[in-house]
């Protein structure tokens, strides 16, 4: 049996069990109580205990807990009247909105699974809508609610089976439906258990078509119960969120939305995005609502930084209110973290808490949480209560696998994919690699070592750890680089395709109207210097860069080169820009 780690650096005790074959099992030493209750049950709880408190707001309206509970129940009754057998899911094809939330809560309260699909799947750019049609075949919904009904009807015109397509933004058609009786609603709600399917969320489909991930009430509730033990202040201080992360993705829909509801908080639905064109909307919302916890992707923090550095009043209010900053989807690069810490310390006299986590759609979303200071930007933290992480030796690193109440029972109606996803002990194969930050202290966390599938070997046989190298390069380029793609499979040396941070580059050049970045001599010279400095510290060929090229075209979300979480899809980008990769090795900038 394992023993609690000694010399804890985290305050969160971890039990480590070492097996003879080198496998390590990590578990939180904090117990998780048996899972009871549901996510919609929390809406009823807060409607009773704080009926007038604001639950959700957007640019047009706000809704209290009591109002939300009443509206969700009316929707439950209408849906139950339309589909009394509850044998097929409904589908939502829409952006985050109050209407979206009410349908989701109203449906799941009575056991109707809700498939939440990216609205990008239905847009004109997605034609001929292969992903959407594949998702429709998997889910077989009886009702599709869409922001753009006309687009949805056009995209789904080839489907022959009966299906209702109705507007999501305006739910009057649903509210006018004669509802099922109150007793029928209560009976349907009473049948909902921790193992009832609540949602179907979809994998990114970067290596094929998206798979429908079954999310049960047990998965969702266990995540929130565990988070309440990791961040106990949430139980005393109802959180305030200003959040844009999409609900069709597990982090926005299962972390941010559920943290708000589970702990009786207020979410302002941010219509901004971490882009140069839309970040101003997010800044305005942050000024108005002053979040107590803040979630964003790394590029979002890069865009927020210049405003915080130039506007002292905004920075003081922001850091004075927020309990922690959470980097979602990918680690925050060291230079951004350093600048955020400097501003926070200057404004409040204390370092801001910058935290992270690791998980997936299949873990709804948390498997580990980083809640302690660390020198490693790639630290994933330690297992959340109730969850076990299995580290299976793979050369100098470990494959990471997960088991716990937060892990899916399987993919929706896909027995073959489900069987392939789990090992013989029931651990979910996440597809990520890692290693312990400190072999003598497992409570010091797990360091991310990249995706098992995206790593490769040079023609010399040298293994390349893409995740670790990418983090080193981005951090070492002092904010000039937003992300990089590591290339070299089939070659005897490594090359970089680099995506630049436009604001940082303009600041370096001090020019309002500069030459294109991919050919600017001053910028190319600076990046080459930084990469040579990296190479001087490199420990071997697997970390030494031979050449680089600046990408003139940013990564495209429409072409799946960048995920909705805001990070690079390495494999997809290498495939789509194969001609550019050839150019990189033919006549890229040589170091």
Image (cartoon, helix red, strand yellow):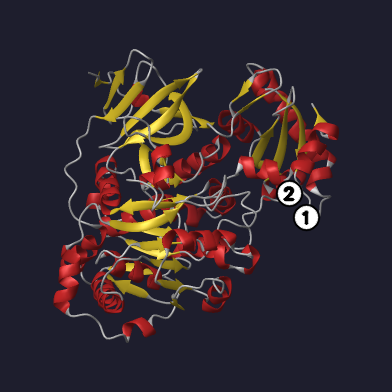
Q: Position of residue 351 (x, y in %)?
A: 42, 39
Direction from residue 24 to residue 159 in the image, left or right: right
- Is residue 549 or residue 561 the one in the foreground? 561
Quadrant holding the N terminus = top left
Residue 321 in view in this figure: no
Direction from residue 3 to residue 381 in the image, left or right: right
- Which residue is under mark 1? 512
Q: How many marks?
A: 2
Q: Position of residue 84 (x, y in %)?
A: 26, 74
Q: Position of residue 265 (x, y in %)?
A: 30, 60
- Is residue 579 or residue 529 the one in the foreground? 579
Residue 162 in view in this figure: yes
Find the residue positioned furthest to the front: 160
Determine whether 586 is above or below 532 in the image.
below
Q: Element type at marker 2? A: helix
Quadrant assignment, res 166: bottom left
Which numbered disc flags the more N-terminal residue, 1 or 2? Answer: 2
Q: Are marks 1 and 2 in contact (CB under 8 Å)?
A: yes
Determine whether 302 is above or below 114 in the image.
above
Crowding at mark 1 (Cα within 10 Å: few <14, some 14-19, many 20+)? few
- Which residue is under mark 2? 506
Q: Give me the residue at 69% from left, 41% from top.
A: 574
Q: Element type at marker 1? A: loop
Quadrant holding the C terminus = top right
Determine whether 213 is above or below 463 in the image.
below
- Is residue 200 or residue 396 the one in the foreground? 200
Q: Give me the residue at 26% from left, 58% from top.
A: 39
Q: Position of residue 107 (x, y in %)?
A: 30, 68
State the separation of the CA atoms marked 1 and 2.
7 Å
């Amino acid at each position: 049996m394992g023993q609690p780690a000694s010399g804890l650096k985290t305050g969160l005790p971890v039990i480590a069990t070492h097996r003879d074959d080198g496998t390590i099992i990590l578990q939180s030493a904090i117990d998780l109580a048996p899972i009871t209750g549901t996510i919609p049950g929390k809406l009823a709880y807060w409607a009773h205990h704080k009926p007038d408190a604001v639950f959700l707001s957007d640019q047009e309206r706000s809704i209290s807990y009591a109002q939300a509970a009443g509206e969700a129940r009316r929707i439950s009754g209408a849906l139950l009247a339309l589909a009394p057998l509850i044998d097929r899911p409904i589908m939502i094809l829409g952006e985050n909105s109050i209407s979206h939330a009410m349908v989701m809560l109203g449906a799941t309260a009575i056991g109707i699974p809700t498939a939440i699909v990216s609205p990008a799947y239905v847009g004109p750019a997605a034609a001929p809508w292969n992903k959407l049609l594949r998702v429709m075949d998997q889910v077989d919904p009886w009702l599709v609610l869409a922001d753009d009904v006309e687009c949805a009807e056009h995209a789904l015109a080839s489907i022959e089976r009966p299906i209702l397509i109705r507007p999501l933004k305006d739910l009057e058609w649903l509210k006018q439906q004669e509802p099922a009786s109150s007793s029928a609603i209560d009976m349907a709600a009473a049948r909902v258990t921790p193992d009832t399917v609540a949602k179907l969320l979809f994998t990114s489909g970067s290596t094929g078509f998206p798979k429908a991930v079954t999310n049960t009430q047990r998965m969702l509730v266990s995540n929130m119960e565990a988070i309440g033990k990791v961040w106990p202040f949430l139980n005393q201080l109802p959180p305030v969120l200003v959040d844009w992360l999409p609900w069709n993705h597990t982090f926005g829909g299962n972390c941010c939305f559920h943290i708000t509801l589970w702990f009786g908080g207020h979410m302002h639905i941010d219509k901004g995005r971490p882009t140069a064109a839309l970040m101003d909307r997010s800044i305005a919302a942050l000024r108005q609502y002053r979040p107590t916890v803040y979630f964003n992707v790394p590029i979002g923090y890069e865009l927020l930084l210049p405003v915080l550095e130039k506007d002292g009043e905004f920075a003081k209010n922001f850091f004075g209110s927020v309990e922690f900053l959470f980097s979602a989807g990918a680690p925050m690069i060291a230079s951004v973290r350093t600048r955020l810490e400097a501003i926070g310390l200057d404004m409040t006299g204390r370092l801001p808490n910058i935290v992270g986590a690791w998980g997936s759609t299949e873990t709804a979303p948390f498997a580990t949480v980083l809640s302690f200071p660390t020198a490693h930007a790639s630290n994933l933290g330690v297992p959340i209560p109730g969850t076990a992480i299995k580290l299976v030796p793979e050369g100098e690193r470990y494959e990471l696998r997960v088991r716990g109440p937060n892990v899916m029972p399987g993919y929706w109606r896909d027995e073959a994919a489900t069987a392939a996803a789990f090992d013989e002990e029931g651990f979910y194969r996440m597809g990520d690699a890692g290693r312990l930050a400190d072999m003598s202290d497992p409570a010091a966390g797990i360091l991310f070592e990249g995706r098992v599938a995206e790593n490769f070997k040079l023609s010399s046989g040298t293994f390349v750890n893409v995740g670790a190298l990418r983090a080193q390069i981005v951090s070492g380029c002092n904010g000039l680089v937003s992300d990089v793609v590591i290339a070299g499979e089939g070659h005897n040396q490594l090359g970089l395709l680099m995506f630049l941070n436009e604001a940082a580059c303009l600041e370096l050049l001090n020019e309002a109207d500069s030459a294109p970045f991919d050919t600017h001599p001053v910028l190319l010279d600076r990046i080459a210097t930084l990469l040579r400095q990296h190479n001087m510290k490199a420990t071997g060929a697997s970390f030494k860069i031979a050449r680089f090229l600046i990408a003139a075209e940013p990564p495209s979300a429409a072409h799946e080169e960048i995920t909705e979480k805001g990070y690079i899809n390495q494999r997809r980008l290498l495939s789509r820009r194969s001609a550019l990769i050839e150019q990189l090795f033919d006549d890229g900038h040589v170091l």
